[in-house]
Amino acid sequence: MSSSILSSSRPLAIDAAIVDLDGTLVDTLGDFEAALARMLGERGRPPIGRAALSLMVGKGSEHLVQLALAHAGLPSTDASDALARYLHHYADVNGRHSALFPGVREGLEALRARGLPLLCLTNKPASFARDLLETLDLARYFGTVFGGDSFARKKPDPLPVLESCRALGTAPGRTLMLGDSSNDAQAARAAGCPVVLVTYGYNHGEPVRQVDADGFVDALEEVAALLAPRA
């Protein structure tokens, strides 16, 4: 396993962590693929391949459906109905084609062993996120789960991160954002939170190590090595 990389020689001093879901904890491309395939099939269009799909995820269901329609050559005026059908199908396939990334459970255990409160923040609808975490036996690690429909704006806007800090009762400067993409990093930076990114996620097809972040890890279990001991 590769070593974790910190942009500064000083370990991160934190009191809590906000953790992304898709691409960070769970490989959910299979669920996206299945739900979109059903929605597009109803419109006489073929499924979207995983390579193309991996470039589309990360900014919420509405954005994903809009990109899928454009990819399939369908009119944007169909977006409202297409979104409703996509969400209907996603509720049925949620978790069926997903799997934990290696080192995720070990990483969460290590963070919990340090006594750090954990909150899951995703652009996926909150009900889908909670169901997926329950299915994969991850819900027990998180006191709170916020989704893309929990606030007026989604990541990369800082609002969800700031509201997550408020829910945790921690200062942004001492609340770590763990994610897989520029969405997470931009939201964290704007909120004043340190951010560490995993290298195996989606990040819209762009090299994740080019994103402005405080550190990078090849597996979630490496995050603990970047943190300062708690007082």
Image (tube, helix red, strand yellow):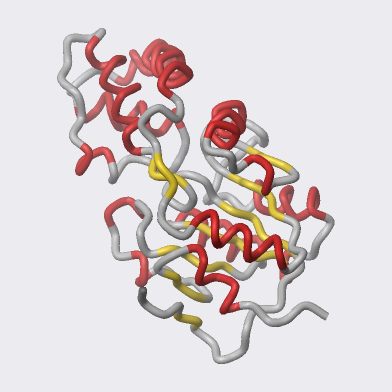
Q: Where does the image place residue 121, in percent across and percent down from the top left?
A: 61, 46
Closer to the camera in the image, 222 or 216: 222
Q: Where does the image place residue 33, in percent across and percent down from the top left?
A: 29, 29
Say above or below: 228 vs 30. below
Figure quadrant of the N terminus: bottom left
Q: Residue at x 62, y 53 (%)?
A: 158
Closer to the camera in the image, 104 or 58: 104
Q: Where does the image place residue 58, in percent across and percent down from the top left?
A: 42, 44
Q: Residue at x 80, y 61 (%)?
A: 170
Q: Residue at x 40, y 68 (%)?
A: 218
Say above or below: 214 vs 82. below
Number of on-image labels: 0
Q: Residue at x 30, y 32 (%)?
A: 67
Asked whether, in this view, residue 7 is left or right of residue 54, the answer is: right
Outermost bottom residue: 9
Res 147 quadrant in image: top right
